[in-house]
Amino acid sequence: MKKFLFFIDELSTWVGKAFAWLILVLTLGVSYEVFMRYVLRAPTTWAFDISYITYGAMFLMAGAYTLSRNGHVRADVVYRLWSPRTQATMDLVLYILFFLPAIAALMYSGWNYADMSVRFREVSIFSPAGVPVFPLKALIPATGVLLLLQGVAEIIRCVLCIRTGQWPQRLHDVEETESLIIREHQQHAAEQQSERGAGA
């Protein structure tokens, strides 16, 4: 079960980090537009479209990654005082009542929305440049699928916590532990080497 959970976490992490590179495209695009507009007095026709498309894609595809890291905003004033079993029970109820129906609605309506946009090869109406927006809209159902997979992993974590009384490890917890062990091993090896050097 742990391998399955870590596989979903790895998938969400890979997609999230891959799309995070769009921040570079967004920064370069906006910087170029500022230079063209205020220095050369020749604004572009595509900068606004590029900015909302790259930001939108980054925002959409970061959802599952953030969920895998347990990074979404939580009003935990009371939640953090509960035992892990109570937390998991509440999370499980909320996932079933709200998360799964919302994701099903996102996938259903997103598929129709994306399908129409791709079939018509939709372009932006905000500028004469005709920047294609159908790739962004095609990401909506893909986002739903990734969120559904990560949501299933979170539901399994809730069930495991209710059974054992402890939250199962997340992938980033394991990665941080491995990094800590490697760092401690390297420090220990360096200390041994310096002791050998001092003894000689």
Image (spheres, helix red, strand yellow):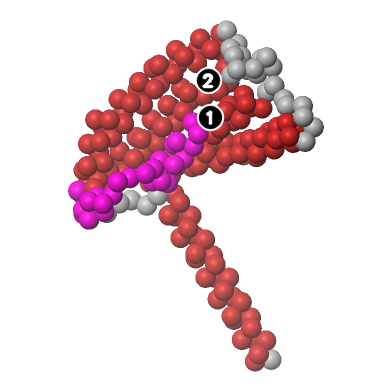
Identify the residue at image location x=60%, y=11%.
Answer: 121
Above-or-below relation of 99 to 83: above
Q: Quadrant of the N terminus?
A: top left
In this view, the residue in front, 134 or 199, is: 134
Report whether residue 32 is seen: no
In this view, the residue in front, 71 or 197, is: 71
Above-or-below relation of 74 to 199: above
Disc 2 marks a residue whose amino acid type is: Ala
Question: In the image, is 71 to the left or to the right of 120?
Answer: left
Residue 80 among those drawn in magenta? yes
Identify the residue at image location x=64%, y=83%.
Answer: 194
Above-or-below relation of 178 to 3: below
Where residue 74 appears, x then y in whole percent?
33, 45
In this view, the residue in front, 54 or 141, is: 54
Would you name the residue on which mark 2 appears?
A: 138
Residues packed near mark 2 inside 10 Å, few (<14), some (14 to 19) or many (20 plus): many
Marks 1 and 2, Cα distance to the nearest angstrom?
Answer: 12 Å
Report whether residue 104 is seen: yes
The disc placed on residue 56 is 1
The disc placed on residue 45 is none
Above-or-below relation of 111 to 33: above
Asked which secondary structure carries label 2, the reply is helix
Identify the residue at image location x=68%, y=23%.
Answer: 46
Question: In the image, is 92 to the left or to the right of 176?
Answer: left
Q: Indicate which label's residue lies in the foreground, 1 or 2.
A: 1
Q: Quadrant of the C terminus?
A: bottom right
Asked which secondary structure carries label 1, the reply is helix
Disc 1 marks a residue whose amino acid type is: Gly
Report if the CB atoms under discs 1 and 2 are less than 8 Å apart. no
Q: The magenta stretch spans which residues?
A: 59-86
Question: In the image, is 93 to the left or to the right of 25?
Answer: left
